[in-house]
Amino acid sequence: MQNLPAVDIGKNRWQGIWVSKSDLVEFLRCKYRVYLAYIRGIPIGELKDNEAVRAIIERGRQFESSVISQMPFEEVEEGERVESLLSEEIILRTPQLIRNHELGLQGIPDLISVAKGKLYPIEIKLHKEVRWSDELELAFYWELLEPLRKRKLKPKPKGYILLNTGEIAEVSLTNYHFQSLSALVEQVREVKTSGAEPAISSECKLCTLRDECHRLVFDRGGLSPHSWNCTGKARAAGELRHNQYK
Ligand code: SF4
């Protein structure tokens, strides 16, 4: 896919901290990694750059490509604006980063069911059942796209998850989704502003920051140097500490 300029939507210009869908997903895994990626200015993926994670990401990419190759969709071309395609009845794929300046949200939905301006987000997942985090992602993209939506249509919020079973699950989005999303976005901004402490969890096993966090947790008296393997008591200690930072 080619690199196209970002699409800036919404009134005014956002001056605060941007939050992406990757931030949200990562925040649910490890707040400290979100903070470090932000202050060091590097993509979160680079903090998980080892073979096991690369293999998982690659599997996801291959699945996404195979699903997309079987679907009829319109792709935004170089020099074309996503806005010019929003009256059509198409499935749209765009490599353009969309930045919502009203909410300070940015991201690239996998696909969008344009539905003549209703704009239903579609996410492609490698798993077999819809998860809560998938529903939050759809809520995120619903909000992201709002300034592009034809308001007079007043569509009921919803989106779709394409599962690896081939099923297309429709998800109705409720106030609870949007309230949960809004709280999460605020927590991500808070972490980016005020920082977070490393906390041991199963995520650490596949993280390049493992040694660095080990030292930090050990220095503050959290765990012994031999307890990093997260067995027995150490895992319990880690979970206890993890919960303290939730
Ligand atoms: S090692 Fe663990 S606590 Fe540290 S950044 Fe990675 S996942 Fe987070």
Image (cartoon, rainbow, N blue to C red):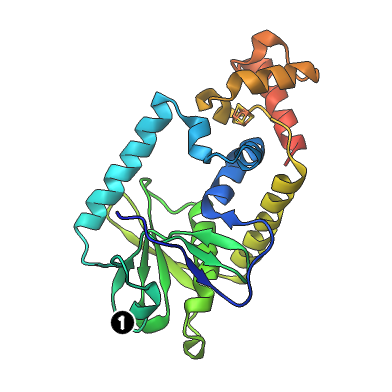
Viewer-proximal residue among 130 and 159: 159
The quarter holding residue 17 reads bottom right
> Which residue is pictured at 74% across the width and 16% down the height?
218
Look at the image and tell me whether residue 135 can be seen: no
Look at the image and tell me whether residue 182 can be seen: yes
**Amino acid of disc 1:** Glu
Pointer 1 residue Cβ closer than 8 Å to ligand 1: no
Residue 194 picture location, percent across and down: 77, 44
Viewer-proximal residue among 27 and 134: 27
Left or right: 15 with respect to 94? right
Find disc 1 in the rendering and name its residue. Answer: 88
Quarter of the rendered structure image containing ligand 1: top right
The quarter holding residue 177 reads bottom right
Q: Is residue 74 above or below residue 185?
A: below
> Which residue is pictured at 46% across the width and 29% down the height?
49
> Which residue is pictured at 66% across the width and 62% down the height?
182
Q: Is residue 202 above or below residue 174?
A: above
